[in-house]
Image (spheres, helix red, strand yellow):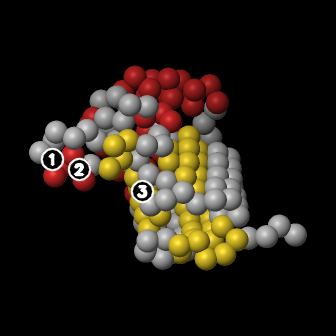
Amino acid sequence: MRLSWRLIFKMKKAMSKFTQIPNVMRILSALAMFSPISPMRIYFNRLRGCQIGNNCWIGDQAFLDVHPQHPDPNNCIIIGNDVAIGPSTKIFTHDTSFWQVSGHKIPIKFVRVEIGDNTWIGPNSFIFNAKIGSHCIIAPHTVVKKDIPDYSIASGNPCKISNLILEE
């Protein structure tokens, strides 16, 4: 069954009212993680507030965190065009470690995660509060906690920029 653009627009308009409810966000999160094909994962992540470009691919069980208390949930994760995110990759937009240790006295730190165009992120990678530039390669099992410049190859835990990709 092919959905018309008019029906998709009506569905998005109806869902925008309900996405502020925590239980709906949990359901959308589960649907985004466990959908069988990438276009469905992209669709449900967009409903949750992620901005995802064209020709992207999101692997199975990839988790794009949109925290319910984020001050700007529609701009917390921005993914450019032609980006591939490997299976079981986790992208976090907040840090609750100090909040938890302080007995909920220190506020949660919220940031925006941006991923540039033409970037490949390997499976089982973790991205915490970082900006990844365009034309980057993030190796599998990499923990990214700092910004990665354009045309870079990053790997390791914590990640290190091992090479720069040169244009020809």
| Position of residue 77 measured from the top left corner of the image (x, y, whole percent) | 50, 44
Tell me what residue is drawn at x 28 percent, y 41 percent: 108
Q: Secondary structure at mark 1?
A: loop
Q: Identify which residue is drawn at 59% across, 52% down.
A: 115
Is the C-beta separation of discs 1 and 2 under 8 Å?
yes
- For disc 3, the marked residue is 128
Residue at x 70%, y 71% (from the top left corner): 164
Kind of residue sitting beneath label 3:
Phe
Element carrying mark 3: strand
User: Residue 39, can we see it?
Assistant: no
Within-10-Å neighbours for mark 1: few <14, some 14–19, many 20+: few
Q: Secondary structure at mark 2?
A: helix
Q: Earlier in the sequence, mark 2 or mark 3?
A: 2
Q: Which residue is mark 1?
A: 102
Q: Identify the disc placed on residue 98.
A: 2
User: How far apart are the two marked residues, 1 and 3, measured between alpha carbons?
Assistant: 20 Å
